[in-house]
Image (spheres, rainbow, N blue to C red):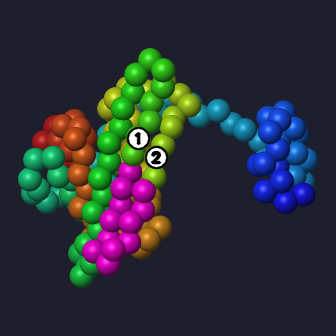
Amino acid sequence: MPIQQVLRKPDLAGRMVAWSIQLSEFDISFERRGPIKAQALADFITELTMEQQRSPGELMPAQSEMDEEWYLSVDGSSNQTGSGAGVILEGSNGVLVEQSLHFDFKASNNQVEYEALLVGMKLALEVEAKKLVAKSDSKLVTGQVNGEY
């Protein structure tokens, strides 16, 4: 059954059944994600970055220098109804990667900002960016990564 047929079917239950049938041949199981401690996440990001002075609000590069510079912008938000983030990765050659995230777990604004940064750094690795300039509006994230805290 083609994926188009599954997606066009108006009945949600029918789509779910069709997907279940399609995916039943694979050994897939859902594992709920445990809570992430903000400090552990901050420490992990700090370990991945190099020591270098940057302007306030700007994070240090995550990889060694190279001719092409990539720019990462992250922003996250959390409230009582949920949390999410936006990630934009832009290369000097015009390549633009945008991603929006929705988290299915309760998180603070700071946790969401860290999650967005991690996703952005993973995207940078996937496009093999060697020089990354990351920006965030979170003073805690930028201060932690830059070694100010």
Q: Nearer the viewer, residue 126 or 35?
A: 126
Seen at 44% across and 17% down, the residue is: 80
Which quadrant would residue 53 be assigned to in this image?
bottom left
Seen at 11% across and 56% down, the residue is: 54
Q: Position of residue 26 (x, y in %)?
A: 84, 54
Seen at 90% across and 57% down, the residue is: 1
Q: Secondary structure at mark 1?
A: strand
- Residue 136: which disc? none
Q: Nearer the viewer, residue 114 or 144?
A: 114
> Is 103 displayed left or right of 91 in the figure?
right
Q: Main secondary structure of the magenta part?
A: strand
> Is 142 displayed left or right of 128 in the figure?
left
Does residue 135 sit above or below 129 in this rendering?
above
Q: Nearer the viewer, residue 123 or 79?
A: 79
Does residue 43 sit above or below 5 in this rendering?
above
Q: Contact (CB < 8 A) between labels 2 and 1? A: yes
Span colored in magenta: 87-98
* Any part of residue 64 in sight: no
Label 2 sits on residue: 100
Label 1 sits on residue: 85
Seen at 69% across and 36% down, the residue is: 31
